[in-house]
Amino acid sequence: MSDVRYPFTAIVGMADLRLGLLLNAVSPAVGGVLVRGEKGTAKSTMVRALAGLLPSIATVDGCRFACDPAAPDPHCPDGPHAGGASSERPARLVELPVGVSEDRIVGSLDLERALAEGVKAYEPGLLAQAHRGVLYIDEVNLLQDHVVDLLLDAAAMGRSYVEREGVSVRHAARFLLVGTMNPEEGELRPQLLDRFGLTVEIAATRDPAERAEVVRRRLAYDADPAGFAARFAEDERELALRITAARELLPKVGLTDVALRQITAVCAAFEVDGLRADIVMARTAVALAAWAGRTEVLEEDVRQAARLALPHRRRRNPFDAPGLDEEQLERTLEEHAQPEEPQPGEPEGEDPRPGEPEGDGPEDDGPGPDGGGPDNGGGGGAPEPAGPEAPAGADAPSDAPDAPGQQPVPAQHPAPARESAPVAAGEPYRTRLFKVDGTGKGAQGRRSPAETDGGHAIRARRPQGRLAHLHLSATLQAAAPHQVARGRASRALLLHKDDFREQVRQGRESNLVLFVVDASGSMAARQRMTAVKGAVLSLLMDAYQRRDKIGMITFRGASAELALPPTSSVEVGAARLESLPTGGRTPLAAGLLRAHEVLRVERMRDPHRRPLLVVVTDGRATGSRDAVAQSQRAAGLLAAQGVAGVVLDCEAGPVRLGLARTLAAQLGAPAVTLDELRAEGVASLVRENRPNRAIRKAA
């Protein structure tokens, strides 16, 4: 692979990404940029190309922390730097690997040397290398939460702290933070999204001419990297000079009262949480003015700053698409464009937006049963079943048995056999927390107990590889009985390598939450399916917040379908749920057997990620003469494999057969009704139904 970077000015299109990166190069105080886009859109190429445009920096010779000789860091571990020699070097691009550890990021003390030899040795981490340069995090959404939080805290404070057993090291860490991610592989948590200054959504162009030019340039670069770079050398020099000029102009740019009022009004109008958005918008607007060569922020700067700084902050749940309402943005800017606005009445005047106080109610009521959920209120959902979308009598058979051999229940019509149009899900809500029993070793998350790098120490053990987290008291206890035999001649403690003990920490892990959803005719009653989809959507949101992987199996007609292979993208799961059709018979056994096969394959791919099976059904089984017996055997197979699960009982009506609870007993899992799922603050422990499972030791 060539060492010659692809030129920044040779990249075709992607104006928003280009602008977002350049604004951060002009003003690192903007807070970095998060690039969201599909694979193969040159995200990494553009970030790496940006580093070549940054001005070179002067550093103190021999300083591992890139201290500026004009203003050295007084806390630099390699200091103090008083009148030392200096030299210039290019700004660094430091790339953070996905599997990076906390010690690798912030640096670490060599604990073995510190305790055995009395040497205080500190090895700088990636944050020290990125100081005054670019820190690039590819696939930032795949990093563990505590690692991302550590990085963003350092970016916000401009300083890194290392604390190890009473020893404290701190150093400057100011860098241009750039993260890229593919939303299909999972989202960042909202609180982490908020820490990125700007965000840019990109997608591959659909223009054949532009795509052809992209391919043409890439092939030319691959054939002759140096020659291709030489073609754009002059453009690169001009752009680098413009960045330098904008940096010099930045302190002279003024933010007028009108522009500041527009910024705060826009943030209030879009209901972003906190004040970080206001600050980032102000810094971005100032950087935009400097980039344009102006010393005053204009309305166009505020408008562009809002488009870059607000979309990722205004999202209210993980299933909403990012973006801004352009009409609302223009209306807010226009309302606050005049400098003579009276100050006292302004806060109250901004909250109710024109036409919206009365408009919210009718808009919410418009979808009728699609958005009404279990409680439609005011009878709004009553006439809807008689409309063209719901066949007459569709509600009646939902409570009638449809399996041979079951006790008959009076019903006027059989279950609908034909496919029904997809029903919209009800509004999501907070659900009960279901955890897998025992202590796992899966990826860090927020659901079940596990041994992780984070959390609190529960015991000590001999190091398994490199010593990561020293258990000091256990180390001293291991060394104490041997001090006389080792002939200690002084008051110093003599430690051998075999004395060291490391901490075993218990935190929480993420799980694979596999949904098995009954989409048969017995579930097709419109009002009930709205409530069921709302419940599954709520569980999907819970999985999103707890960093789980999710998968979805649906069964209807004659077979079961893997609607969503296990993935970290909960948004895709919500989309599949929204378009889920219903109708036909109930092949419950096929759904359970498909779940068994999916879990078997996933266990081979990721043996440490424990599954949680969520079966959403009324418990009925049809499709063959022995459908009930087949479903019982399939449930017993899952129970024998020790799969932890929960059954969401969707049975409704005045007469209930309790079939879902019978299924839950066969699975060795609890059964929860739709109403019970809503209970807040109640933690449910889903036990792994393992035969002869050993009694867990108390933590």
Image (tube, helix red, strand yellow):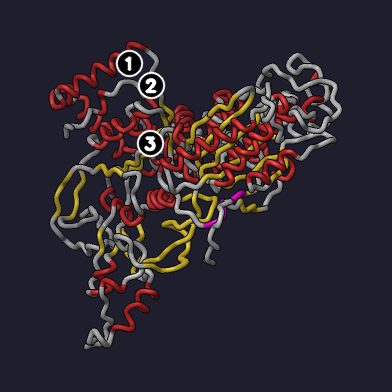
Please report the bounds of the magenta region as a residue range: 434-438
Q: What kind of residue is marked 2? A: Ala
- Residue sitting at x 84%, y 30%: 409
Identify the residue under disc 2: 204
Looking at the rendered structure, the secondary structure element under dot 3 is strand
Identify the residue under disc 1: 211
Confirm or deny contact between disc 1 and disc 2 (CB under 8 A): yes
| x and y percentages locating residue 633 in the rendered image | 62, 38
Q: What kind of residue is marked 3? A: Thr
| Crowd band around label 2 with a 10 angstrom C-alpha radius: few (<14), some (14–19), many (20+) | some
Q: For the residues marked 1 and 2, what is the alpha-carbon distance in whole angstroms?
A: 8 Å
| x and y percentages locating residue 518 in the rendered image | 65, 31
Nearer the observer, 7 or 591: 591
Figure quadrant of residue 428:
top right
- Residue sitting at x 40%, y 45%: 143
Q: Is residue 483 magenta?
A: no
Confirm or deny contact between disc 3 and disc 2 (CB under 8 A): no
Whichever of labels 3 and 2 marks the residue nearer the N terminus, that label is 3
Give the number of the disc on residue 180: 3
In the rendered view of the protein, which quadrant contains the N terminus? Answer: top left
Q: What kind of residue is marked 1? A: Arg
Q: For the residues marked 3 and 2, what is the alpha-carbon distance in whole angstroms?
A: 15 Å
Q: Is residue 180 above or below residue 16?
A: below
- Residue sitting at x 15%, y 53%: 86
Whichever of labels 3 and 1 marks the residue nearer the N terminus, that label is 3
| Crowd band around label 1 with a 10 angstrom C-alpha radius: few (<14), some (14–19), many (20+) | some
Whichever of labels 1 and 2 marks the residue nearer the N terminus, that label is 2
Nearer the observer, 570 or 59: 570
| x and y percentages locating residue 567 in the rendered image | 47, 35
Residue 358 visible at all: no
| x and y percentages locating residue 316 in the rendered image | 59, 37
